[in-house]
Image (cartoon, rainbow, N blue to C red):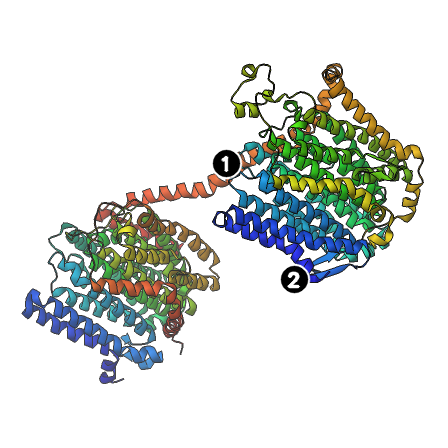
Amino acid sequence: MSSTQILLIVFLPLLAAIIAGLGNRALGNTAAKSITTGALFASCLMSWPIFLGFLNGSLQETVVPVLKWVESGSLTFDWALRVDTLTAVMLVVITSVSALVHLYSWGYMDEDPDQPRFFAYLSLFTFAMLMLVTADNLVQMFFGWEGVGLASYLLIGFWFRKPSANKAAIKAFVVNRVGDLGFMLGIFGTYLVFQTTSIPDILKMAPGMSGSTIGFLGYRVATMDVLCILLFIGAMGKSAQLGLHTWLPDAMEGPTPVSALIHAATMVTAGVFMVCRLSPMFETAPVALSMVVFVGAATCFFAATIGTTQWDIKRVIAYSTCSQLGYMFFAAGVGAYGAAMFHLFTHAFFKALLFLGAGSVIHAMHHEQDMRYYGGLRKHIPLTFWAMLLGTLAITGLGVYHLKLGFAGFWSKDAIIEVAFARGTDLATFAFWMGVIAALLTSFYSWRLMFLTFWGKPRWIESEHIQHSVHKTPEQAGEDTTGGYHPHESPLPMLIPLGVLSVGAVLAGQVFAPQFLDSAAFWAGSIFYNENLIHRMHAVPYLVKYAAFIVMVLGFLGAWYAYIRNPSIPAKFVEQFRLVHQFVYNKWYFDELYNVLFVKPAFWLGRIFWVKGDKGLIDRFGPDGAAALVVQGAALAKKVQSGYLYSYALIMLLGLVAAITWVLV
Amino acid sequence: MDTATSFALIAPELLLAVSSLLLVLAAAWGGDKAARPVTILAVSALFGAGLLLWPVLHLGKVGPETWAFGDLLRADAFAGFAKALIYLAAIGCLVVTPSWFDRMKAMKPEYPVLVLLATLGMSLMVSASDLLTLYLGLELNSLAAYVLAAYLRNDSKSAEAGLKYFVLGALASGILLYGMSLLYGFTGTTSFAGIREALSGEMSNGMLFGVIFVLAGLAFKIAAVPFHMWTPDVYEGAPTPVTTFFATAPKVAAVALTARVALDAFGGQVDAWRQVVIFAALASIVVGALGAIGQNNLKRLLAYSSINNVGFILIGLAAASVAGASAMFVYLAIYVAMSLGSFVALMMLHDEDGRALETFDDIAGLSTKRPALAWCLLALMFSLAGIPPLLGFWGKFVVFQAAVEANLVALAAIGIAASVIGAFYYIKFIKVMFFDAASPATVADSTRAHWAVLGITTLIVSPLGYFLTRSFGDLGDKAASALFLLP
C-alpha cells in the first residue's frame, strides 16, 4: 500500500469528473463514459488489494499527507488521507459499487442526451465519498460530507426539467442541512473541548473526558453526551433516520443507478460510518448511545411498516434501505460496531443489487415503476429475475444456523438481532424486538415485491407508459392484459453488474463473517471492539438464533398467501383496517406534519420578509427610492434650466445671497 | 528686483503676446487663405512658450526669486504646472479645429489668434498675485472667450451662446470687482500677500463680504453650482471646437486662480470659506449628475459632466491642504485629457454632409459602424465614471484621499455616493453605442489630426496612464508646495 496508490484511488475519480464535466459535449458521450468508468475501475482494482491486505493482517494503518489547509492560531488541520481497516472496508464498498454503477449506467442512461454530465456527477460523488471515509480530521470529513450532499442534490435533480425531481432535490438538500447543522455544532463543540479536529487525537483524549460537564443552552450536561448527540444528528440526516428520513423516498426521483449508488450502498451509510469511526468517543457517552439505539430501532420498524404498503418499486426498496440503516445504528448503539459495519458491507451488495435489478425491471417495462402494473415478468426477463431473487434471499436473510450456511443478510442481520438480545439492557431488548418484527416485515415486503413483479398474470396494459408504447387503451386490448407489449431483457452492461453483485449478495456474509464479527485483530483498533459482548452474542439461546429465520419464513408465507394464493386478501385487509392502512400508507403523515410545522411557517415568514421587509422597506427606501429621487431631480434640473437669461442671473444672485447669509450666520 | 529679471520671468507670456500681435497682422494681410499657416504658427508659439516653462517646472521654483514686478506676478512651480496644462490643452484644441470648421468653410485666421490671446489671459490669471493682475488676466481671457463663443456669427445658436456668456460674464465680473473693492477698502492693499496679512486677525463683515464676492466671481469662471447656469447653453450653442476649448484650458486657469486666491490670499481664514466651497462642491456634483441624466444632446450632457467634475475638484480645494491642492491638480490634468478626448470624439461624429451627430439617437449602435471610435469613447466614459483600472479612478481616488486626510470624511462619503449617479449616464453612453440597434445615420471618416488627439488622450486615460502617475503626482506635489510657499 503505497501513498501513490492511495492518492490515485481518491483523486482519479475527481480527475475523471473534471475532464468529463468540463469536456462535456465537446468530449462526446463515449469518451466521457470511458474516462469516468475507467477511472473508477482503476480505483476499484487498487482498493481490493488494500482490503485483502488488512484482512490477512499484512497492512498497518497509514496516513498520507496531501496539503496544508488551515493554520490559524491554535486551529490547524491539513488535507491528509487516513487508511485503516475501517477505511479499507469503505474503500472497497464505494469503489466496487461505484464502478459497477458506472458500467450499469452505460446501458441504463443510453438514450439520455446529457450523459457526460451524469457520469461527471457520479465520479464527483465517488471522490467526495472517498474523501469522507479517508478523512483524518473532522473538517475534512465535513468536506466530504458536504461534497456527497452536493453530488446527491445534483443527481436527484439530474432530470431538472421534471418539477418533481427539482422538488425532491431541494427537499433532500434542505433536510440534510438540518442534520448538517447538528454535525457542524458537533465539530465546533469538539474543537472547543479538545482544541483539535484531528480524529485520532480526539479519540485518544475522549475517555479522559467522560464524566466532565459543559454548559449547554443554560443547563449543565455531560460533555461527551452533548457532542455525540450533535454529531449523531448529523448522521441521522445523512442516513435518513426517523425524523430526518423524509428526503430519502423522494430522492427516488433521480435515475435508478443513482439510487443504487448513493441512496442505498454508500452515501446513506456515511452516518453509520461516522458513528463507527468515532466509536471510542460514543462509548464515553451513554445517553447518546441510548439515543442511537432508540432511533435506530424505531427507524428499523417504522420504515419497514411503510415498505409493506407502497406500490412504487423503488420506494419499497428505499424504505427498505431506511429500515436496514436502522439495524446498523442500533447495532452500533448497543456496542457491536463490527456488526454494524458488517451489515453496512453486505447491505451495500444486496441493496445495490436490488436497486439495479429494479432499474432493469423499469427499463424493461418502459419506465413504469408501479408494481400494480407488473406481474408475470419471470419468464420475460429471466436473468433480472434470478438476480432479484438472490437479492431478496440475501435481504430476507435466508440461512440455517446449524449448517453455518446462508446468504449475506443472514450473517449480518442475525448477528445484529442476537447482539441486541445479548446486550440485555431494556433499550437493547426493545431494539431486539423491533429488529425481529422488522425482519418479519422485511421478508413480507420483499416477497410482496417479488410476487407482484415476477409472478401472477401480466397487468401491464393498465400502465400509461405501456399504453403509450403499444398505442392501445385497456379497452382496445381486451382480454390480452399484456397489451401486446414485449418486455426485453436489459443489455450486457446492465447484466454484468447484476451478476457481480449477485455473487456478493450470496457470498459476502459467508466469506467475511469471521473477520468482521469475531476478529479484534482485523479491526486493529480502528473501531471500538467489545470482545465480551461478542462472546455473549454467540452464547444466546437457540430460539433467539432462529428468531430471524422463523419470522422470515412467516413473512414469506404471508406474502405468498396474500399475493399468490389468495390475491383478494390485501384489498379485504385494507377494507378492514382502513385507518391503520391509511396511516401507514401515508408514511405516518410525516410529510404532512412537517408541512404544517415547518414548511408553511417558513414560507409565511419568508413572504413577510420579502413583501414587507425587502420590497416594502429596503427596496422602497433604498434602490427604488433613490432611483425615483434621481429621476425627479433630473426633471427639476431640466425645468430650472429654462434658457432665460434673467432666471440664470437670478439664480446666481440668489446663490450669492445664500452664501453670504450662511457665512454671516 | 530689476526689470530685466522680471521680464525674464514672464518670458512665456511675452512670447505669446508678441506672437499674437504678429499673427493679427499676418491674418489681416493674408486673409482666409492664411488660416492654416496662422494656426500652425500659433501652435508653434504655444509650444515654444511651453518649452520656456521647463526650468520652473523642473526645479520646482518657489519664493521671492519668482516674483516679478514687485510681486504682481509669480512665475513659480504652481503657475508653471497650470500653464503647461493650459498650453497643452490649447494646442490640442487648435490641432483639431481647422478640419472641423473646414466642413462649413468657416475656418478663419482670427480663430487661432483669439485662442492665443485667451491663452495669454489665462497665463496671467494663474501667475497673478495681485487683484489687479488677476482681473487683467481674467478679462483678457473672458473677452476673447465671448468672441469665440459667437464665432459662427450667422448661426443663431452660436450667437445666442456668445451673448448669454457675455451678459452673465459681465454680471460675474461685476460681482468680482465689487468684492475686490471691498477687500481693498477694508485691507488697504490689492496684493495677495498683503490681504493674507490683513485677514489674519479677526475678520470684519466687510472683509467677509469681499471674500465671498470674489469667490463667487471666480465660481462663475469654473462653472460651479449655483454659478453654472450659463454652461449647458453656452457649451451646446458654441461651435464644438470652442466648447472643447472652454471645457479644458480656461477651466484649468480658473481652478488654478481660485486655488491661489483661496489658499494664498484667503489662506489664513480657511474656515470662513470652507463651508461655502463644500456646498458648491456637493451641489456641483449632484446638479451636474442630475442635469446630465435628462439630456439627449451629447454636448449638453458633457457640459453637465464638466460641472460634475468641477465638484470633485472643489473637494480637493475644501481639504485646504498640500495633499488636497496636489490632488486637485492631478484630477485637473486627468480631467483635461478625458474632456479633450470626449469632445474630439464628438467632433468626429458627423455624417457625409458635415452635419454633426450629437444626440444619443445618432450614436446608437456606433460599435458596429465605427468600432475604433466606439472603443475609445468606451474607455473615456468609463474613465469619467471613475471605474478602475482607468485613470479617472485615480483622480477621484486622490481627491477623496485628501478629503479623508483633512477629516472631511462625510464630504468624501457623499461625493463617492453621488458619483454613482454620474456613472449612470456615462454607462448609458456605452450601452447606447454597444447594445442598441444601429441608427440609420452614417458616420463619415475622420481626419488624422482628430485620430491623433483622440488616440493620445485615450492612451492617457487607459491603464497605461498609470505609468504617468508618478511624474504627474510629483509635479502636482511641487505645484501644491509652491502654492503654500513651501520649498
Q: Is residue B414 left or right of residue A515?
A: left
Q: Amino acid at mark 2?
A: Leu
Q: Quadrant of residue A467?
A: top right
User: Is residue A233 among the parts visible in the rendering?
Assistant: no
Q: Is residue A343 left or right of residue B81?
A: right
Residue that badge 1 annotates: A616
Q: Residue A384, image x and y in percent?
A: 67, 34
Q: At numbered mark 1, what does the secondary structure look like: helix, strand or loop?
A: helix
Q: Specify the label residue B460 is tagged with.
A: none
Q: Specify the label residue A67 is tagged with.
A: 2
Query: Closer to the camera: disc 2 or disc 1?
Result: 2
Q: Is residue B7 left or right of residue A135?
A: left
Foreground residue among A535 and B483: A535
The answer to whether marks 2 and 1 sit on the same chain is yes
> What's the CA distance linking mark 2 and mark 1?
49 Å
User: Is residue A333 among the parts visible in the rendering?
Assistant: yes
What chain is tagged by disc 1? Answer: A
Q: Quadrant of residue A484?
A: top right
Foreground residue among A531 and A231: A531
The C terminus of chain B appears in which quarter of the rendering?
bottom left
Classify B453 as above or below B349: below
Q: Residue A123, image x and y in percent?
A: 61, 48
Q: Earlier in the sequence, mark 2 or mark 1?
A: 2
Q: Amino acid at mark 1?
A: Gly
Q: Residue B216, image x and y in percent?
A: 30, 58
